[in-house]
Every structure is written in C-alpha cells, then in structure tokens.
Image (cartoon, grey):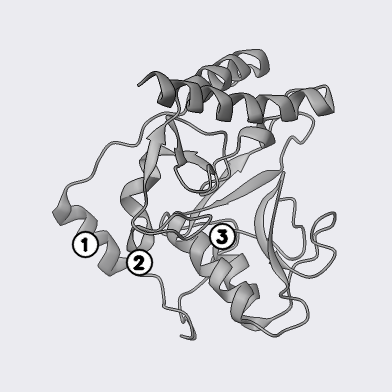
Amino acid sequence: QAAVARSLEAIAWQHAERFQRVHTMDDKMFECVVCLDMCHQCINCTKCHQILCKRHVKDLTQNRCPACRDAPFSFQENVALQRIIGDLRQRLGLAEPTPTPPSSPESASRASQEVAAPADGEEGEEEITPGIVLPVYGFKRLLPAPYEGQFKKVPSAEHAERMQRHAQACTHSSCQAVWRGPWGSFLGGPQGRTHFDLTSCPEGRRLNRLLGWNYEDPSR
C-alpha cells in the first residue's frame, strides 16, 4: 500500500510540475481525456497513466482505455492528484461539478432508442438544430471571463471515440486530427492546433455539428 501511495503521489506531482513550467495553474493541465473538463474523482490508467473522471468508466467502449486503448481497462484512484485539483478549483473559483443522478435501466433503454447515434459509415439522417446538443453526443458549457457568450463543446465518451475513429480512417485533407482546445473538441485540418480549422469533410462536418459547432461562428 505504501508503494502504491508513493506511485500515485509521483504521478500527481508529474502533473503539478507542468504548472510550474508555465508559472501558472491552468485547468487544461488536469483535463479529463474523455470529457475534456477538469478531472473529478480522478483516476488514472495503470498502463499509460492518463487521467479521467471515474464516472466515465462504465461508458468505455469494449472496456478499453480511451487514451492507450489497453483492455481490459485497469485503473487506480489518484487521491493525491484529486487533492491538487481540489486546491486548484478553489484558486480559480470553480464549483465542484454536480453529479448526474443515475437513470433506471428502463429509461436509459428508452433514451437510447429515441436518440441512438449512427454507427461509423452511416449517413446519419438526424436533424441538427443549431445551438442544441443532444446528451448522447455531449454538451456545451459556457466559458468564463474573458470569453463571455462563448462555449466549450464537450463530447460524450462515445462521440469522442467516434470522432477519433473518423480522424484515423478519413483521407480528406481537412480531417487530420481531433483537436482539443479552450472551445472544445473538433475534427479539423493542419491549423487546428491554433485556429478554428474545422473540417470540410461531409462526415467530419456532421460529427462536429452534432457536438454543437457553428461553422459561421465557431466560438458560439
């Protein structure tokens, strides 16, 4: 147990040292690999040490790590890192996320039937309403100052994997990667690391729009 505790502490301070290198505490450094929000009830993969929120474990496709794809997914709770994140939340004035109440199997089954996401390769005939993101695809979160009126697009675990699979399989020149930044995840071209280089690939564009991306005003 002492060895495990030391290992968790070492992992926690590896992340903390990243803060010191940039002389500031940025919630991006402690981002969950699935929801891209600051990690809550933090766990890490025992193989690649990538961190994520514990609540995502039940939704992992084929019980694989969302980062290194190792299966079956093996993790450990990182109490030391969670303490650092708790302190960071206080420094930044961020509230703890409100837990989502569990739904009954019957209601979950009905919801999945009503808003089932299309599989890869399907055309996807669902109507996309600008500004509206169905929970099966993720959600939009209002950004704090100085980004008033702008939104971060956070994909669900399943939609994040769907976007990643498309990026790996697509040969379209504007579908090079799933980029992650202050405004969320999107499929995009070579300038996506620093610009809103949203893909023009028809399927990639559809996946972006399902997550709430507005091609006319990407910050919204």
Label 1: which secondary element: helix
Return the residue at label 3: 211
Return the residue at label 2: 115
Q: Amino acid at mark 2?
A: Val
Label 2: which secondary element: loop
Return the residue at label 1: 110
Q: Amino acid at mark 1?
A: Arg
Distance in Å between CA atoms under marks 1 and 2:
9 Å
- The residue positioned 63% from the left and 73% from the top of the image is 167
**Residue 202 relative to residue 56: left or right:** right
Judging depth in this view, the residue of 212 and 190 nearest the camera is 190
Which picture quadrant has residue 147? top right
Classify 10 Å Cα crowding around label 1: few (below 14), some (14-19), many (20 and above): few
Label 3: which secondary element: loop
Q: State the image coordinates of residue 48 (x, y, percent, origin top left).
A: 53, 48
Q: State the image coordinates of residue 116 (x, y, percent, origin top left).
A: 34, 69
Whichever of labels 2 and 3 marks the residue nearer the N terminus, that label is 2
Q: State the image coordinates of residue 99 (x, y, percent, origin top left).
A: 36, 31
Q: Residue furthest front?
A: 3
